[in-house]
Each structure stands twice: as C-alpha cells, then as structure tokens.
Image (cartoon, rainbow, N blue to C red):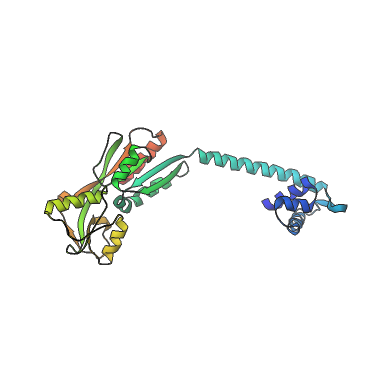
Amino acid sequence: MFPLLDTLVAVYEIGQFTLAADELKVSQSTVSSRIAQLERMVGAPLFVRNAKSDVTPTEAGRLLYRAATGIDGTWRDACEQIARMRESREPLSVAFSHTTAAVLLPVALPVMAKALSGFDCSIRVLNSDAILEQAGMKAVQLGVVEKPIVNDSVDRVTLREDRLVLAGDPHGVWMVREHGSGVRYYTDLYFKTVGFMPSRMIEVANNAAIGAALAAGFGCSLVSAAAVPAGVPTRELGDEFVRRFYALVPRSGLTPGQRELAGRVIAALRG
C-alpha cells in the first residue's frame, strides 16, 4: 500500500506522471499502473489528464492525498518512536569461556531472551584470562569462567561444580588449550601432579575442535565430563580435578538494569 500512496503524493505534488516517475526512480508505466490500481480501489478517477502531460487532481484525488499524507506522517512518527525505543535499550555483553559456553550457555540464553525488549544482548567466547580483563575494563557486564581468577575490579560468584576427565587415548597425542584458558590451568596441574610432560603435544585453542578430534578417535585431552563426545573413553581424575564455574561481575559501571539482568542470569546458572 505504501508504494501506491507514495506515488499518489508524488503525482499530486509534482503534477506530472513523467516527473513523478523520475522522483520515485521508477518507470512512467509503473506510476500509471499504481494510479490506475488506486482508482480501481476507490472507484473514482484521481486525476484529470491535461495537455502537455500535466494532471489535475479530482476531488477524490484531493481527498485521498490528504489521507495519504496523514498516514505517511503517522507512519514516520511511529518509526521514530520505535527508533527512540531501540536507542533507549541497554547493552548487556556476556563473555563465556569455551567450556562454560558448551555447558552453561544453553541455560543463560532463555533468561536473556526474555529481556530483549529492553536490552541489546551480545555473547562472546574467550578464554578465562581474557574474560577477566574484559570484565575489569567493563567491556562486558558479565563473565562466566572455569578458572578461580579474580581482581579488585570484579566480584566473583561461584556457580556450580564441573568434573574434568581425561578423554581419549592417553598414549596418543595430547591436545591442550592455550595459556590463559581454564582447562590449560588444570591440564598443567595434571602434568605436575603425575610428574609427566608429554613429548607429543598440540595446542588447540578451541574446545569444539578438540571435541571433534576426540570424536574422530584422535589423541587425548582434559575436558569437562559434560562435554565429552559420545563413545569417547574417559578416565576419572579424582576430587582435585572437580573444579567450579564462576561468574565475574564488574564492581562498578553497571546500570541498575544491567546488574539486575546479570543477577537473573547468575541465578539461573547456579540453579
């Protein structure tokens, strides 16, 4: 309907089909077709064709022009109000470590989805040290990590326990996460605990890639028991490798709305 009314307004104000077509960047035949369609809809001619391609609006044309400009104004007002509403929405940026993204992100998403009318939500996946840095700089309003890290600029909240296992063939190539990762922290702890440093080791900075390799029968790695691909053999590591997931929240710089939504996400993750 809007292209038809826009065409009516252009013809009415310019007084020619040809010039109106140039204004609308369509063909003259398109303008003629749209006006004819409107005339069929209202059951009356809208313009009188004069010499030299000029047109004069009929009474029906004048009436429909006034209605069209009113509709256009109402539409533009509504669009501007929606734009202002969107501009007033608060950002909520949440960063998950690789393991917590696989295990906890499905729990957080429904909570965040319910708040989309008032928040622009975004999610990043980083390693734990990078998340601490981002939360400390208030670049994210909530971080979810698998490593007991903290600094003076963030509050740390314990969420739940997570059991690490040795997955795959321990005599094969070891796949380890990069330094700064929560899993790498525990992998290095495992090597120290058992007094062992593998001679064949590949650094893989992505949990999903490690999981895919394990599922294909390649190598071994320390991974969350909740993220072990089906069919991959595992070995228990004991209580020392039952770690915790944590939420990191900046101590300052959050609006009341951001802090309240972050609290709701944390409550769901702790549940």
Left-right relation of 5 to 132: right
Q: Which residue corresponds to the image point at 48% horizontal and 39% vertical from the top-left? A: 89
Outermost residue toward the bottom in this view = 217
Quick one: 187 or 42, which is closer to the camera? 187
Counting from the top left corner in percent of width and height, residue 208 is at 31, 58
Quick one: 259 or 268, which is closer to the camera? 259
Is residue 191 depicted above or below 259 in this figure? below
Is residue 1 at least partly visible in the picture? Answer: no
Outermost residue toward the left in this view = 195
Is residue 151 depicted above or below 205 in this figure? above
Left-right relation of 252 to 203: right
Q: Which residue corresponds to the image point at 41% horizontal and 41% vertical from the top-left? A: 92
Counting from the top left corner in percent of width and height, residue 8 is at 74, 50
Outermost residue toward the right in this view = 51
Q: Which residue corresponds to the image point at 45% horizontal and 43% vertical from the top-left? A: 120
Outermost residue toward the front in this view = 199
Is residue 195 at least partly visible in the picture? Answer: yes
Please state the total of marks drawn on the protein image: 0
Q: Which residue corresponds to the image point at 75% horizontal and 51% vertical from the top-left? A: 20
Counting from the top left corner in percent of width and height, residue 116 is at 45, 45
Quick one: 260 or 92, which is closer to the camera? 92
Counting from the top left corner in percent of width and height, residue 197 is at 15, 56
